[in-house]
């Protein structure tokens, strides 16, 4: 795996492309907490977090990009832009359990990530 580019490492592991705008947004956030609850993972932490939560197994085609500090993952379709945002419990990471949060990640972040 290419560990020079953390996004490439995640792409190789997951089999999913990550859009350039999503790469740019996550790079700019770089592990920040936005609003009261939305914590975004730094690019260097994406692979480890997705491995830990077994995103590839339970939510193939999706990427965990953060969490709400209360047991739910923030999940997006990494190859789509704009991409919708969903919350899903870490203990039930199934597409059937996704809860829609926003239609566009960048707009959600700009508005302060209200949950």
Image: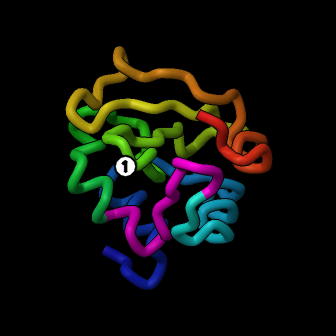
From this view, report whether residue 39 is shown above or below residue 16: below
In the picture as drawn, the residue positioned furthest to the bottom comes out as 4
Q: Is residue 115 magenta?
A: no
Q: Which residues are magenta?
A: 34-47
Which colouring convention does the figure follow? rainbow
Quadrant where the image shows the C terminus: top right
Under tag 1, what secondary structure?
Answer: loop
- Looking at the image, residue 30 sits to the left or right of residue 43; the answer is right
- Looking at the image, residue 93 sits to the left or right of residue 26; the answer is left
Depth check: give the residue in front, 38 or 3: 38
Give coordinates of residue 7: x percent, y percent.
48, 66
Please name the residue shown 21% across and 33% down the image. 91
Q: Is residue 27 in view from this perspective?
A: yes
Quadrant where the image shows the N terminus: bottom left
From this view, report whether residue 96 is shown above or below residue 114: above
Depth check: give the residue in front, 103 or 1: 103
Give coordinates of residue 70: x percent, y percent.
36, 42
Q: Is residue 44 magenta?
A: yes
Please name the residue shown 51% across and 31% down the image. 86
Give coordinates of residue 19: x percent, y percent.
63, 52
In the picture as drawn, the residue positioned furthest to the top comes out as 96
Q: Which image quadrant for residue 114?
A: top right
Please name the residue shown 29% across and 43% down the image. 55
Residue at image mark 1: 15
Q: Bin the neighbour count of mark 1 within 10 Å (Cα to Cα): few under 14, some 14-19, many 20 and up.
A: few
Q: Is residue 81 in view from this perspective?
A: no
Task: Give the total number of marks visible in the rendering.
Answer: 1
Please name the residue shown 40% across and 63% down the image. 46
Give coordinates of residue 44: x percent, y percent.
42, 75
Depth check: give the residue in front, 70 or 3: 70
Q: Which image quadrant for residue 27?
A: bottom right
- Looking at the image, residue 54 sits to the left or right of residue 67; the answer is left
């Amino acid at each position: 795996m290419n560990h020079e580019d953390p996004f490439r490492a995640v792409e190789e592991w997951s089999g999913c492309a990550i859009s350039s705008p999503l790469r740019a947004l996550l790079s700019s956030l770089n592990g920040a907490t936005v609003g009261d609850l939305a914590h975004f993972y730094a690019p260097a932490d994406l692979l480890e977090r997705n491995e830990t939560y077994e995103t590839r197994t339970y939510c193939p085609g999706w990427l965990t990009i953060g969490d709400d500090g209360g047991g739910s993952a923030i999940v997006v379709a990494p190859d789509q832009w704009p991409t919708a945002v969903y919350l899903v419990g870490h203990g039930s990471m199934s597409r059937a359990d996704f809860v829609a949060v926003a239609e566009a990640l960048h707009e959600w972040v700009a508005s302060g990530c209200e949950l």
